[in-house]
Amino acid sequence: MIIQKEITLKPRARGFHLITFEILDALPELKEFGRGIANIFIKHTSASLTINENVSPEVKTDLNNYFDKLVPDSLPYFEHTIEGPDDMSAHVKSSILGYSLNIPVTNGMFNLGTWQGIYLCEHRNRGGARKLIITVTGE
Amino acid sequence: MIIQKEITLKPRARGFHLITFEILDALPELKEFGRGIANIFIKHTSASLTINENVSPEVKTDLNNYFDKLVPDSLPYFEHTIEGPDDMSAHVKSSILGYSLNIPVTNGMFNLGTWQGIYLCEHRNRGGARKLIITVTGE
Amino acid sequence: MIIQKEITLKPRARGFHLITFEILDALPELKEFGRGIANIFIKHTSASLTINENVSPEVKTDLNNYFDKLVPDSLPYFEHTIEGPDDMSAHVKSSILGYSLNIPVTNGMFNLGTWQGIYLCEHRNRGGARKLIITVTGE
């Protein structure tokens, strides 16, 4: 059994944003799967997806500050500057953090650890509404 | 055909640890798959999974030293400090290295390159026994 | 339905290289899939795979320069030096960037965003011909 759908996230500010429930709300079909794998893929190159601690708001702040320092906007040697100072840094961050998550599905639910939540990592100052493709394979 | 199981790794010290054979020992069902994909997912936010060179012990040391310098404990701007100096650094490292591996399965075996082994990246000083969900889809 | 095949990429110089069309040319079976997931896995520990912006040649240069600075060759504390100055740095970069991509397949095509292309990240000065395993699961 396989389902696939595209969802559009509401626009977010630059930073790390928990989207676990926005995804689950868009995916009522998940409960039909006894076991399987959910692939969540972001169709962009300046935003990415990760999993991280889902309770403390300081984690979001710290993640954002860390990656902003790891990949500063406007590094002096960047040549790809035509789309603004936050564009090439966004591309680098996206490759570090990654474009898809593969999460086990068990008994109709994401089989995440207690502290795991799904994050949209928005690397642009004005990234707009990001599109995800969600594919669930299983039985 | 799909199988899914949870396994609990024995506790490890902070660092990079080869777990290829610990996973294979827990997965006798793998030999029933002619071809497919194995997803190995870690249910934590302060430990991660990667693939790397599986022979030289210096590789483990160098990986550990590199990531400890890339994401130092107790960065002065970290706000999420309540769980200890190795906690927020562990969260950052986990997002960089990633929470799941997707490995092709061919003729009943992981279709890894000659030098590829599966690593648990334990980012906490006392991380305890880590849980993995392994899902194999194929035929 | 599942297909799996090994392909060998032509050798590339150190750097980031778009391989979307080299993969598609090797994968005529893709058009038989209405929906599914394609896993592209690299069987090496000194080269990796990522997705990034697929038009501007400056993006390739900037990515290469960024990762060469993030993980310099011959870091003074590296102990795994027997295979040359570009070997341990290649292992670290590979774990940061990752060994596999999981891309949704829709209507016989990779369901990539407009600006997304598939990159081989060649981290060795002379990496040779890299092998990929491509597995497509779907219907």
Image (cartoon, coloured by chain):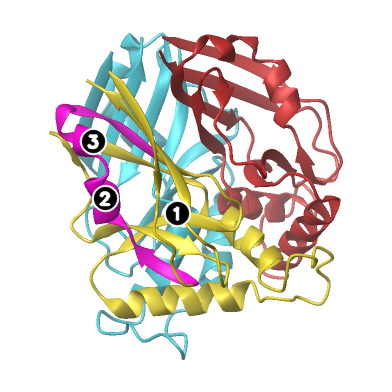
Chain colours: A yellow, B cyan, C red
Q: Is residue A29 magenta?
A: yes
Q: Residue furthest left?
A: A107
Whether callout 1 and callout 2 share a subunit is answered no
> Is disc 2 in contact with disc 3, using a CB cutoff of under 8 Å?
no
Q: Is residue A139 left or right of residue C50?
A: left
Instruction: Please tell me whether residue A46 is drawn above or below residue C34 in the rendered image.
Output: below
Instruction: Please tell me whether residue C116 is drawn above or below residue B138 in the rendered image.
Output: below
Name the subunit of mark 1.
A
Which residue was labeled with disc 1? A49
Q: Is residue C54 magenta?
A: no
Q: Residue C60 at what x, y percent from top left?
A: 79, 51
Q: Is residue B104 left or right of residue C113?
A: left
Q: Residue A125 at what x, y percent from top left?
A: 57, 73
Mark 2, residues whose alpha carbon is within 10 Å: few (<14), some, or many (≥20)? many
Mark 1, residues whose alpha carbon is within 10 Å: few (<14), some, or many (≥20)? many
For marks 1 and 2, give the one nearer the viewer.
1
Dot 3 amino acid type: Val
Which residue was labeled with disc 2? B43
Dot 2 amino acid type: Lys
Dot 1 amino acid type: Leu
Q: Is residue B109 visible?
A: yes
Whether callout 3 and callout 1 share a subunit is answered yes
Which residue was labeled with disc 3? A105
Q: Is residue C77 left or right of residue C59?
A: left
- Alpha carbon of mark 3 to alpha carbon of mark 1: how far? 18 Å
Q: Is residue C138 left or right of residue A34?
A: right
Q: Which residues are magenta?
A: A14-39
Q: Disc 1 on helix, strand or loop?
A: strand
